[in-house]
Image (tube, rainbow, N blue to C red):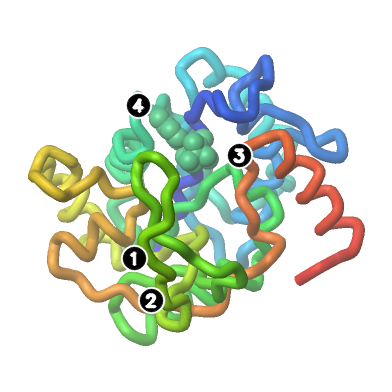
Amino acid sequence: PKLGVVLVAAGRGERLGAAEPKAFVRLHGRTLIEFGIGVATSLPHGGHLVVVVPDSHAVRALEIVEQVLPEGSEWLVSVVPGGRERHESVRFGLEALHDTVEVVLVHDAARPFATAALFERVIAEVRRTGDAVVPALPVADTLKRVDAEGVVHETVDRAPLVRVQTPQGFPRELLAAAHADAALLSGAEPGRSAPTDDAEVVQRAGGRVRTVPGEVRAHKLTTPADLALLEAIMEANVA
Ligand code: C5P
């Protein structure tokens, strides 16, 4: 397969406070990873999906794959254990990808309602440009820079700012090379924090990152409030 999807689902989800890892929490009766596996394997022409889960949940994940994958699917699906940090989970996922994969998407299981249309938009832009591609939305709130005490120092111009989501897409070699360079992943240098998404890793390696329009419904589940928000987004069928 030429298309690869790494579905990262190995986080503990501590901010959600659920008994299970976040990707195994249910929304409308289905686990988050069911939604992620479902949308990835609905993409036409097949591909290789690597689902990265906590070690403790590998068997459960395989059972879910069996349930979700339609009979005769052109998708190859693997389950691999994740790491302590998200970037480790991504790297383990990348290492498990089939040799023939040319374009890879990295997607958070915590964004269960991202649509196939968004996946396709990202893939098309990676193929068109050969660059990294992230879904982006405008920022609605006024942004302020504050200090450790919460005192405001300035308002930050939001016009040139966007908030980005997943799936993030890459030429496979570009992302694999960037993730293989441990120096890019550390926050050890002064004034530099650890990267919080894959596009940042690629950018640190000198790659160009483009944006395509994101989706409100690709909202990430982080706190209990996001559960309510996601249910409402789905009920209202917001794009
Ligand atoms: O914790 P957060 O919501 O930022 O995690 C984003 C995504 O990365 C989630 O889908 C989570 O399961 C995944 N993750 C992972 N391995 C980790 C940490 C997070 O696969 N060690």
Real-space CA distance between mark 3 and mark 2, rounded to the nearest whole angstrom: 28 Å
Q: Is mark 4 within 8 Å of ligand 1?
A: yes
Q: For residue 88, what is the image quadrant?
A: top left
Q: Which image quarter holds the C terminus?
A: bottom right
Which amino acid lies under the numbered mark 4 shown in the image of this protein?
Answer: Gly
Q: Mark 2: few, some, or many residues within 10 Å (few <14, many ≥20)? A: many
Name the mark nearer the viewer: 3 or 2.
3
Q: For residue 126, what is the image quadrant?
A: bottom left
Residue 227 higher or lower than 25, as above or below = below
Which amino acid lies under the numbered mark 1 shown in the image of this protein?
Answer: Phe
Q: Secondary structure at mark 3?
A: loop
Q: Which residue is mark 4?
A: 83
* Residue 8 visible in the shown view: no
Q: Which residue is mark 2?
A: 126
Q: Is residue 124 left or right of residue 176?
A: right
Decide which of 30, 146 is in the foreground and name it: 146
Residue 170 is labelled as 1
Which amino acid lies under the numbered mark 3 shown in the image of this protein?
Answer: Thr
Q: Is mark 2 within 8 Å of ligand 1?
A: no
> In the image, residue 212 lies at what x, y percent?
49, 79
Q: Mark 3: few, some, or many residues within 10 Å (few <14, many ≥20)? A: some
Chain-order first, disc 4 or disc 1: 4
Chain-order first, disc 2 or disc 4: 4
Q: Secondary structure at mark 1?
A: strand
Chain-order first, disc 3 or disc 2: 2
In this view, the residue farthest toward the right is 235
Q: Which image quarter holds the N terminus?
A: bottom left
